[in-house]
């Protein structure tokens, strides 16, 4: 296989694919480190909405500093190929982050249930019903 380079990144293997593009493991030849290199898929003219959304994602993510968000290192375009380089997370960190996402999902579910309970209690209080019986289902 021929060596593929985009800017100063040597593209290695594909890590994943999403709605916006494909992510590859790449080597930053200037800083001698591995990065995740996201390439915008398809043809993206210089002023297309997809390119604008891609650039907006990079700018928004680069403003964040959190251990569960990959750091953005670079954004650019070479030979009409838009790319963004970000922190390359090890698989165990990605799994940890997905477990955090699962916990957030469970928390959202719990909050949804609590919201329903709150709504019932609020209705009962407004109707001056002070004996509280909360059931999981109606049947």
Image (tube, rainbow, N blue to C red):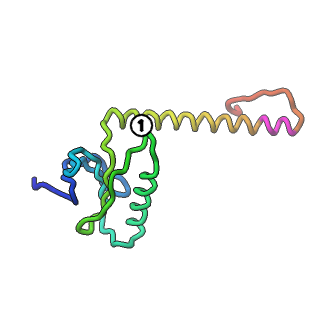
Q: Which residues are magenta?
A: 121-126
Q: Tag 1: Cα neighbours inside 10 Å, few (<14), some, or many (≥20)?
A: few
In the rendered image, residue 52, in percent from the top left (x then y), is placed at 41, 66
| 125 inside magenta stretch | yes
As drawn, the residue found furthest toward the right would be 128
Q: Which residue corresponds to the image point at 45% horizontal and 44% vertical from the top-left?
A: 65
In the rendered image, residue 93, in percent from the top left (x then y), is placed at 36, 34
Q: Nearer the viewer, residue 31 or 111?
A: 31
- Judging from the image, what secondary structure is the residue with disc 1 in? helix
Relative to 95, residue 56 above or below:
below
Q: Which residue corresponds to the image point at 36% horizontal and 37% vertical from the top-left?
A: 94
Q: Which residue corresponds to the image point at 46% horizontal and 48% vertical from the top-left?
A: 64
Q: Nearer the viewer, residue 50 or 5?
A: 5
Is residue 11 among what the camera can see?
no
As drawn, the residue found furthest toward the front would be 31
In the rendered image, residue 79, in percent from the top left (x then y), is placed at 23, 68
Is residue 112 among what the camera can see?
yes
In the rendered image, residue 112, in percent from the top left (x then y), is placed at 63, 38
Drawn side of residue 137 relative to residue 10, left or right: right
On the image, numbered disc 1 is attached to which residue? 98
In terms of image quadrants, where is residue 4?
bottom left
């Amino acid at each position: 296989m021929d060596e593929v380079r985009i800017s100063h990144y040597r593209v290695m293997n594909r890590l994943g694919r999403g709605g916006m593009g494909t992510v590859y493991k790449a080597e930053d030849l200037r800083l001698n480190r591995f990065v995740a290199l996201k390439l915008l898929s398809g043809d993206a003219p210089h002023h297309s909405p997809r390119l604008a959304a891609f650039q907006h994602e990079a700018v928004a993510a680069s403003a964040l500093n959190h251990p569960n968000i990959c750091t953005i290192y670079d954004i650019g375009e070479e030979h009409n190929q838009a790319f963004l380089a970000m922190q390359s997370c090890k698989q165990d960190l990605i799994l940890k982050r997905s477990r955090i996402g699962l916990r957030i999902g469970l928390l959202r579910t719990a909050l949804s249930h609590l919201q329903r309970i709150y709504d019932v209690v609020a209705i009962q209080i407004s109707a001056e019903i002070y004996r509280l019986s909360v059931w999981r289902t109606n049947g």
